[in-house]
Image (tube, helix red, strand yellow):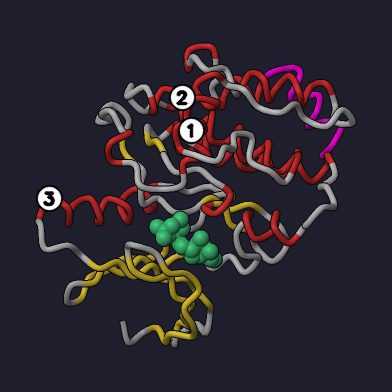
């Protein structure tokens, strides 16, 4: 740990802290996710899996893993620093001015490409949301926070263990069905909607009414000025039956979306 000096705390969560550090030899900045290792051995493996799964990813739109090590009861995951902050902060900074379609499509294509890489490695992210999507100083998307990720096939029903924000959770999860690749697609649909409107697609005063809206797939329509292809894509990503929802491969290769991307990138 003495190879890195801590500059400041940039995030705090139930796991521990995210620290901005300086590497003493290279003088480069990195982020360290400092995780308090639990006393229970089976939970320790769960904490370690975040480092293991992140280290398997190599993609221009996924936070680059540098190294991980343990000392005392702490696990340190050293990774690339994304100085542009997270996408939620970026959306909140926007206040009322909408993003232009070019920007929305550029970010969306980058997130889909990152998520497709994860799925190709037979991993599910399971916590895709604007707060877990980071930006570099030049505005490139970097998907992060593999703290909930798991290997495909080992996924059990998930609702009982879910502790995060409920806005991005797919209907099948509330129905206590297994988490699958299409559940990540649903969550990305929520982020796409947020980029288009600066609001969550599913919002309600109570958990119960929120879950009802999600399970009906009932969201306020996108603003009329957005291209028809985008409205269509939104509808596909919010199909309540995961089988009817497109995979990331389908999204990235569909004629409608490729046309959108061609016109706006
Ligand atoms: P948690 O499990 O608490 O959600 P995250 O990995 O999402 O942990 O990190 C918490 C916060 O710290 C993020 O929302 C983000 O604001 C910041 N953060 C984490 N990793 C990075 C990074 N590589 N670059 C910049 N900010 C980061
Ligand atoms: Mg997070």
Q: Residue farthest to the right? A: 225
Q: Toward which corner of the image does residue 173 lie, by quadrant?
A: top left
Along the horizontal axis of the image, is 258 left or right of 169?
Answer: right
Cα–Cα span, label 2 and label 3: 29 Å
In the image, residue 27 above or below residue 31: below
Q: Residues within 10 Å of mark 2 (few under 14, many from 20)?
A: many
Residue 42's disc is: 3
Is residue 172 a member of the stretch shown in magenta?
A: no
The residue identified by callout 2 is 171
Q: Nearer the viewer, mark 1 or mark 2?
A: 2
In the image, residue 242 above or below residue 66: above
Cα–Cα span, label 3 and label 1: 25 Å
Is there a contact, CB below 8 Å, between mark 1 and mark 2? no
* SS assignment at label 2: helix
Identified at 45% across, 82% down, the residue is 23
The residue identified by callout 1 is 184
In magenta, the rendered stretch is: 254-265
* SS assignment at label 3: helix
Image spot of residue 95 (x, y percent): 78, 57
């Amino acid at each position: 740990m003495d190879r890195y000096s801590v500059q400041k705390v940039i995030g705090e969560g139930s796991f521990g802290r995210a620290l901005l550090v300086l590497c003493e030899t290279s003088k480069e900045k990195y982020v360290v996710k400092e995780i308090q290792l639990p006393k229970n051995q089976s939970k320790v493996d769960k904490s370690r899996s975040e480092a293991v799964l992140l280290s398997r990813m190599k993609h221009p739109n996924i936070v680059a893993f540098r190294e991980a090590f343990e000392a005392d009861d702490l696990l340190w995951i050293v990774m690339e620093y994304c100085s542009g902050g997270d996408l939620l902060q970026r959306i909140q900074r926007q206040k009322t001015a909408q993003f232009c379609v070019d920007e929305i499509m550029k970010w969306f294509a980058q997130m889909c490409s990152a998520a497709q890489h994860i799925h190709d490695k037979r991993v599910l992210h399971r916590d895709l949301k604007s707060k877990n999507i980071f930006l570099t100083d030049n505005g490139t998307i970097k998907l992060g926070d593999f703290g909930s990720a798991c290997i495909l096939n080992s996924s059990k029903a998930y609702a009982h263990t879910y502790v995060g924000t409920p806005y991005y959770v797919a209907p099948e999860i509330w129905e206590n069905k297994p988490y699958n690749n299409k559940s990540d697609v649903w969550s990305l649909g929520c982020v796409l909607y947020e980029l288009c409107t600066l609001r969550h697609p599913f919002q309600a005063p109570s958990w119960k009414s929120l879950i009802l809206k999600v399970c009906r797939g009932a969201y306020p329509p996108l603003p009329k000025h957005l291209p028809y292809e985008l409205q269509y894509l939104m509808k596909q990503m919010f199909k309540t039956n995961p089988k009817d929802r497109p995979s990331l491969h389908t999204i990235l290769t569909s004629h409608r979306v490729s046309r959108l991307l061609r016109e706006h990138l």
